[in-house]
Amino acid sequence: MTSDFARTAGTGLRFARSAFLGSSLVLAGLAPTPSATATAADAPVDLRTAGTYAVLADGSVTNTGDTVVNGDLGVHPGTEVTGFPPGVVNGQVNAGNAAAERAQSDLTTAYEDAAGRPSSRIVGPQLEGQTLTPGVYRASADASLDGTLTLDAQGNAGAVFIIQVDSGLTTAQNSDVRVVNSPGPACNVFWTVGDSANLGTNTSFVGRIMAVNAVTLESTARIEQGGALSRDGAVTLDTNAVTRSDCAAPAAPTRAPSPTSPTPSPTVSPTSPSPSPTTPRPTRTTPRPTSPTPSPTTPSPTGTTPSPTTPEPDETETETAAPGPDLTVPGAPEVEVPPEAAGSDNE
């Protein structure tokens, strides 16, 4: 009886001690709370000027086929950008200039921020078939995707997903990273890759890949709401579609003003010579009608034959001074002779 009581009392004492210790750890914040850590909200990664880039490389950017880059494209310290066209860049192209250098510096800062955050769960090496809620996840070795990886935003448009891959990232053909239960675009999906990233043919990917080394997109692979960003390597494209995040600052258009600026110049040039041919025409026509008008009037008095010896001013005076009857009377020349005849008669 006494021994049974002792065993019962001891068991109760151990239970009470465990309960006290567990409650003390929870109050002290030392006990694990899996549900809280898995859904803890993390601040988005600030890429600063690198946020407007859909493609950013260290050495070169090479393309094959009809790739479409929706966002800026840059390379630094390298300057090689090939394959555009046929590729199209809907944004700025910065090769080896100060803008690309600043973007590379901001990319390094963003990578160190995202890769250094404490993770809440270990994933990989195979990501297929997993569903991740907002948080920070880590693959301690190579990570591969041969199928579908689901990111559940749980109704939060600002949900943040950070997947830290210590080594390389590889996706197989037709792999898919999809975001569900997001009321808006999934702007805050970040991948840090300690080595190189390779997306297989026809892969559909979501998020910004920030890789230390090269990023390669095989034929028809697509990246949405993100980009292919390499810190120390090249970016290789092949008939891809890469679209930067909708939450990034809008890229400044540089190609739109260039075609519009020359358009006003040709419109002004043809209008200036138009008045020049019209102005001389009235000057030529006005003197021509005036010159012939006096000519037909002047020859009319020249019909009198005895006037060639007399000067031109006398003709005009006789026309104006002599009255009309003196010219029209037929006996006018005989009127000047009668004095001689009259003298003979008087004699």
Image (cartoon, rainbow, N blue to C red):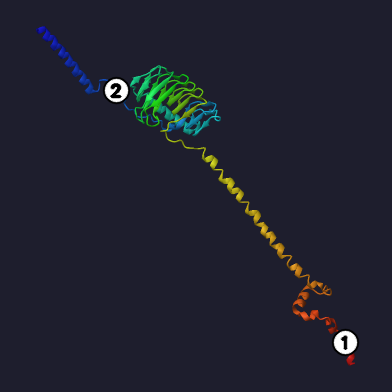
Which residue: 65% across, 57% down?
A: 279
Give the residue type at disc 1.
Answer: Glu
Can residue 35 be seen from the camera position used here? yes
Q: Quadrant of residue 224?
A: top left
Image quadrant holding the C terminus, namely bottom right
Give the residue type at disc 2.
Answer: Ser
Q: Quadrant of residue 8?
A: top left
Residue 214 in percent (x, y) is at 48, 22
Q: Secondary structure at mark 2?
A: helix
The residue furthest left is 2
- Side of 64 where 24 appears, left or right: left
**Vertical placement of residue 88 versus 332, above or below:** above
Q: Secondary structure at mark 1?
A: helix
Judging depth in this view, the residue of 30 and 149 nearest the camera is 149
Q: Residue 340 has which mark?
A: 1
Q: CA distance from mark 1 to mark 2?
A: 157 Å
Which residue: 52% across, 31% down?
A: 88
